[in-house]
């Protein structure tokens, strides 16, 4: 593996530690825990998907689970 690919892989690995990746139930559970642990009154979410429509759908699924 080339130097650039190793650096990229290292960055991805490091960023995964602070990412929440999974289905809506898992993500919502983790977000609720973060909210409780840090007494947060708001949470910012960035969803990376292949299209605008799938990003909006992701936000809708998370919001639906957070409001339950």
Image: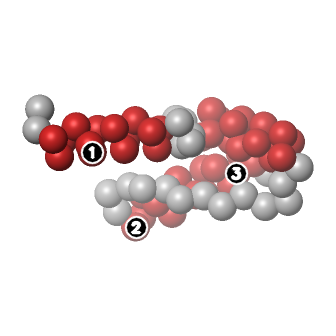
5 lies left or right of 61: left
Question: In the figure, 16 relative to 38: above or below?
Answer: above
Res. 21 in view: no
Question: In the figure, 52 relative to 64: above or below?
Answer: below
Q: Which residue is mark 1?
A: 8
Mark 2: secondary structure: helix
Q: Earlier in the sequence, mark 3 or mark 2?
A: 2
Mark 3: secondary structure: helix
Please give the label number shown on residue 64: 3
What residue is drawn where x is 60% and y is 58%?
45
Label 3 environment density (alpha carbons within 10 Å; few <14, some 14–19, many ≥20): few
Q: Earlier in the sequence, mark 2 or mark 1?
A: 1
10 lies left or right of 26: left
Query: Is 7 in front, or is 29?
Result: 7
Mark 1: secondary structure: helix
Cα–Cα gap, marks 1 and 3 = 34 Å
Query: Is 22 in front, or is 6?
Result: 6
Q: Earlier in the sequence, mark 1 or mark 3?
A: 1
Query: Is 62 in front, or is 16?
Result: 16
Do the numbered discs 2 and 1 sit on residues whose CB atoms are within 8 Å? no
Do the numbered discs 1 and 3 sit on residues whose CB atoms are within 8 Å? no
Q: How many marks?
A: 3
Q: Which residue is mark 2?
A: 52
Q: On the rendered image, what quadrant is the N terminus found in?
A: top left
Q: Quadrant of residue 11?
A: top left
What residue is drawn where x is 62% and y is 33%?
26
What residue is drawn where x is 34% and y is 38%?
10
Place of residue 42 in the rendered image (x, y in percent of width and height, measured from the top left):
78, 61
Label 1 environment density (alpha carbons within 10 Å; few <14, some 14–19, many ≥20): few
Q: Quadrant of residue 49?
A: bottom left
Place of residue 9 in the rendered image (x, y in percent of width and height, measured from the top left):
29, 38
């Amino acid at each position: 593996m080339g130097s650039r690919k190793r650096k990229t892989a290292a960055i991805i690995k490091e960023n995964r530690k602070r990412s929440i990746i999974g289905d809506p139930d898992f993500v919502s559970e983790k977000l609720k825990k973060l909210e409780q642990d840090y007494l947060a009154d708001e949470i910012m979410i960035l969803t990376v998907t292949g299209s605008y429509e799938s990003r909006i759908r992701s936000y809708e699924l998370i919001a639906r689970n957070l409001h339950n």
